[in-house]
Image: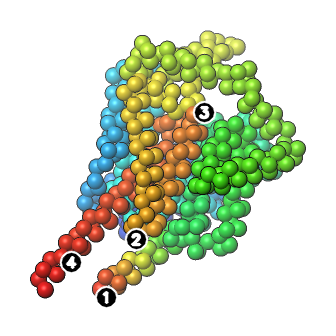
Amino acid sequence: MIDSIVVLASILVLVFLLRTVETRSDDVDESEKDSEKT
Amino acid sequence: VKLAVIIVFANLYFICKGFVRPYYFLLGYVWMAFLYPQGFLDDPFRGLPFPPLLGILAILGYIFVDRRPLPRFTNVFLLLVLFAVWVTCTTYLWAEVPYAAAVKWNWAITSIGTSLIMPFLLRTRREIESTFLVVFFALSAHIGTAAAKALTGGGGYGVLATLIRDNSYLGESSTLATVTVMSLPLAMYVGLHSLCADAIPFRRISLMVYTLVAVAAIVGTSARTGLVALGAYVLLAVRSFWKKALLAASVVAIGYALLPYMPTWWTSRMQTIQTYETEISAASRLDVWQWTFEYVKTHPLGGGFDVYRINGLNPSATGPPSGRAFHNIYFETLGEQGFVGSGLYLLILGGVLIGSFRLAKNKDGADDWVPRAARTIFTTTAIFAVGGSFIGIASQPIGYALFGAYLSLRQFVTERAREKEQQAAQHESQACQV
């Protein structure tokens, strides 16, 4: 029971943070492109 | 079954994402290598072919979807290629125990291969930090389970019910204790400096809670290696000498104050550090290391994977004595791969330590995350090198993932330098035209 809860929690947090890294890095790329244009 | 369903869905997530961003295939592969669900799932789920599928998809994804130019082949990369060739020779040309050597080669070569493919697919900040996340959260599943069981009274040497059910890989208490310490610098980087750091609620408190969970897991394993690795981390975590001294003194003082409240199985196990010569586990390690020295004198090319099986240092009440494992990455590679393989391995380990240390010192670029990531790789590799003095984990994915992360970071720095050179050349040509 403990095993399932811990593994599930670790996967859910991992997926959430992977998505956050993806979105934030896209934002960083966009802002870098904007600054290069200006 | 519940666990199996969770893991199948997680794999499907990595596969689906991989078709859009191919590095997710490799992330999925690394996640499976560290979580190692084959060690705790029942049949038929343990045999699901996700790792080879993700590995093949990662290679195909790089060739047909990703299609970025080849990375720069650094010295560490070339040494890893040579090491892969050498271990294949020792396995198939002169192994002392050919069948066992071939079995170990099968998974050891995938560990080396993973580190070699990482700079192809993981070479931007997003990709490198995603690797940190994947490694950290796969490890935290093992650490969280061990801590929860230790806190509910299930701790003790060889007693703690880890996520992996047998005494192998992260189910082995000393290995689990070492990787728990290795997870601490990763947690610090993810929680303080990564792109997702701001998204973590109460991040300083969360980090403190995770540190306590990690300490509970280390105490729960009751492995002396964990205490040594933790000591190494304390010394490496702080840069200034006076802060190091203050931190070490605080840890000793807190440890001394807490000692009466620690479980007796833990204190009695830790006291054996002082009497290592009479303690069977430690004394037999010294015997194996002595045997390895004598063995390579007559077999300088090594005896192939699992050559320890012929040392006969593990007495048995019912039959002939069996082999006692090396319990040390340096003696493991020396005995198995001889002077050549051992030299290559030391050069790789030293190259990663020196290279990441140099990157950590280099702070003149705009990418302030690079020195921090390099520092994390350096600290984690140093803990691996210290903890590895008491456990035979040279062929496991733990060290090779660090080598791969270093190659990826090195690739990022090279690409950035090239981009800057191109931009400078463009500016110059524009200025000439004006």
| Disc 1: CA contacts within 10 A as few (<14), some (14-19) or many (>=20) | few
Viewed as shown, does residue B242 lie left or right of B66? right
| Disc 4: CA contacts within 10 A as few (<14), some (14-19) or many (>=20) | few
Amino acid under label 1? Thr
**Helix, strand or loop status at disc 1:** loop
**Helix, strand or loop status at disc 2:** loop
User: Residue A38: which numbered mark, if any?
Assistant: 1
Q: Nearer the viewer, residue A17 or B193?
A: B193
Label 2: chain?
B
Which callout, 3 or 2, points at the residue further toward the start of the chain?
Answer: 2
Q: Give the spatial CA distance, label 4 vs label 3.
A: 55 Å
- Reply above or below: B361 against B423: above
Label 4: chain?
B
| Disc 2: CA contacts within 10 A as few (<14), some (14-19) or many (>=20) | few
Amino acid under label 3? Phe
Count of numbered circles on the image: 4
- Residue B97 seen by the camera: yes
Q: Residue B221, percent across and down?
A: 71, 42
User: Residue B427: which numbered mark, if any?
Assistant: 4
Residue occupying the point 62% across, 48% down: B235
Where on the picture, by quarter, is residue B327? top right
Q: Are marks 3 and 2 in contact (CB under 8 Å)?
A: no
- Reply above or below: B156 against B251: above
Q: Give the labeled residue for mark 2.
A: B366
Q: Residue B318, percent across and down?
A: 68, 13
Q: Nearer the viewer, residue B375 or B306?
A: B375
Q: Give the spatial CA distance, label 1 vs label 3.
A: 56 Å
Amino acid under label 4? His
Label 3: chain?
B
**Helix, strand or loop status at disc 4:** helix
